């Protein structure tokens, strides 16, 4: 077997890899600085579709992490890119926050409640019964159902929050229609990230803290995968999966030397 090619570009998950509960993970700052100085293309990925890259840049900066706006890749951006590829200049009814509405606007989509091509569901903290009812009726009337990510819950300092996957389940129960989920573990999220960087799968690595999303999606997109143990998946759980990462490391601090 031939030696693997050097890693020329990097994708990394955000929560559980670079930050945890609003604090930077030791090594994250060093990793990001090393990456920026190397000049290698990279993207920081998140399945959360609530925030714009500009919002996330500011939130990370508050934690002392410098990630350029153009180096942030959200499931909202991936969804907008997917939809413009499928149906350029289409229309959508959106249940979500500015992260999603801004991404769709910038992709040339028109947001409307009248016979939209799609109902697009993302994260929000203000799900209203009225808006969910509207979405359900539009899907019953023929709108296609897209969701930014399948996560059922998200973290907060007070405890778990219902996330996009939970609200998607509610809409599915009411309509009998399953959404197409764009975010991880769909490898589409990785492929679009690669296209955005003009990177190649065989010379790109993905870093994540979850076997069932980051590692499986990275593997299916043909990337090398690094699992860090500072988030969801524990070392004991790794062997239970029918696939494995290229390498398991304690934390992002152990990846710095590989950049
Ligand atoms: Mg994570």
Image (cartoon, grey):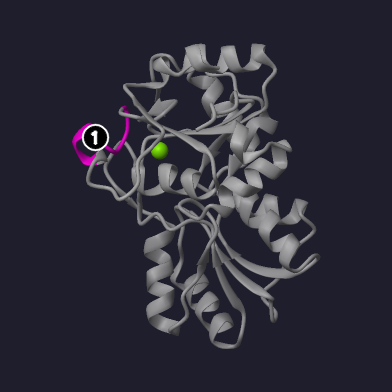
Residues in magenta, as a range: 230-237
Residue 142, quarter of picture: bottom right
Q: Residues within 10 Å of mark 1 (few under 14, many from 20)?
A: some
Residue 41, quarter of picture: top right
Q: Is 235 colored magenta in this rendering?
A: yes
Residue furthest out toward the front: 1
Which residue occupies 40% across, 61% down?
165
Name the spot of residue 83 as percent of width and height, x first.
69, 63
Q: Main secondary structure of the magenta part?
A: loop
Q: Secondary structure at mark 1?
A: loop
Q: Nearer the viewer, residue 14 or 188?
A: 188
149 to 50, vertically: above or below: below
Horizontally, is 182 left or right of 36 in the view?
Answer: left
Visible residue check, residue 178: yes
Q: Which residue is mark 1?
A: 234
For the image, the number of numbered tags is 1
Q: Nearer the viewer, residue 97 or 235?
A: 235
Which residue occupies 69% across, 76% down?
117
Ligand 1: image quarter: top left
Which residue occupies 32% across, 33% down?
231
Residue 56, quarter of picture: top right
128 to 245, vertically: above or below: below
């Amino acid at each position: 077997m031939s030696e693997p090619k050097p890693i020329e570009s990097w994708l990394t998950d955000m929560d559980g890899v670079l930050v945890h509960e609003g604090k930077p993970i030791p090594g994250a700052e060093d990793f990001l600085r090393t990456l920026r100085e190397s000049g290698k293309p990279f993207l920081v990925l998140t399945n959360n579709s609530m925030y714009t890259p500009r919002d996330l840049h500011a939130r990370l900066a508050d934690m002392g992490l410098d990630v350029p706006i153009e180096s942030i890749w959200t499931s909202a951006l991936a969804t907008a890119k997917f939809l413009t590829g499928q149906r350029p200049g289409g229309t959508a009814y959106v249940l979500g926050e500015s992260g999603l509405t801004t991404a769709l606007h910038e992709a040339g989509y028109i947001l409307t409640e009248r016979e939209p091509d799609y109902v697009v569901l993302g994260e929000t903290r203000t799900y209203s019964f009225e808006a969910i009812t509207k979405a359900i009726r539009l899907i019953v009337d023929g709108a296609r159902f897209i969701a930014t990510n399948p996560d059922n819950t998200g973290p907060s300092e007070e405890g778990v929050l219902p996330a996009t996957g939970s609200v998607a389940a509610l809409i599915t129960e009411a309509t009998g229609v399953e959404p197409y989920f764009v975010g991880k573990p769909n490898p589409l999220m990785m492929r679009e990230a690669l296209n955005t960087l003009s990177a190649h799968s065989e010379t790109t690595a993905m870093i994540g803290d979850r076997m069932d999303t980051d590692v499986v999606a990275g593997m299916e997109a043909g990337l090398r995968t690094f699992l860090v143990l500072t988030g969801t998946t524990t070392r004991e759980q790794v062997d239970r999966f029918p696939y494995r990462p290229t390498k398991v490391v304690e934390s992002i601090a152990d990846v710095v030397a590989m950049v």
